Image: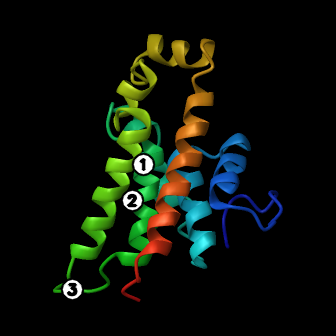
Amino acid sequence: MTTSSEDIPETPEAPEAHAARLFAAGHFCAEAVLMAGARHLGVESPLIPAIATGFCSGLARTSGLCGALSGGVMVLNLAYGRERAGESVEQSYAATRRLIDAFRGEFGATGCTDLLGCDLATPDGQRMFREQGLGERCLRYTATAARLATGLADEQKPIR
């Protein structure tokens, strides 16, 4: 895969472990999930991980959807997303809803601020994130989103 992580050796590992390793190496949540999921699905693109960057930190620190979960949605759409207008969205939407429900079931929330208990848009929230080591939670969210998304991608018959 063409990515900015050529320094990370390619080894056979589960997407969950791969995403966790990428996150620990400095990639952010959505980037790591997308990279691990793309590799799992055999998708290569020079757009990965760059296309995921703005989804990190709860949609660019706006208290939005967890970036790891957003990365998981992108993984699902590598398998089920539309390539042309007029194609059905149903398989993609069904898989996305299942991913969101499973993530919420594991963690009780889907929003970055709710998951972390701090607002990353504020200096106080960013300080709290650093001082309380909340990145460890993000690592867990990242690994779990990769596991759930690739599991759903493997479970259903892709449209491609």
Q: Earlier in the sequence, mark 1 or mark 3?
A: 1
Amino acid on which the number 2 mark rests in the picture: Val
- At mark 3, the secondary structure is loop
Which residue sits at x=42%, y=48%? 69
Which label is found at residue 73? Answer: 2
Which residue sits at x=36%, y=86%? 159
Is 48 on the left or on the right of 80, as rendered? Answer: right
Q: Are marks 3 and 2 in contact (CB under 8 Å)?
A: no
Spatial CA distance of label 1 from label 2 is 6 Å
Which residue sits at x=55%, y=56%? 147
Q: Earlier in the sequence, mark 3 or mark 2?
A: 2
Q: Give how far across and how far down residue 101 sits, in percent.
A: 32, 48
Q: Are marks 1 and 2 in contact (CB under 8 Å)?
A: yes
- Residue at numbered disc 1: 69
Residue 157 in which image quadrant: bottom left
Amino acid on which the number 3 mark rests in the picture: Glu
- At mark 1, the secondary structure is helix
- Residue at numbered disc 3: 87
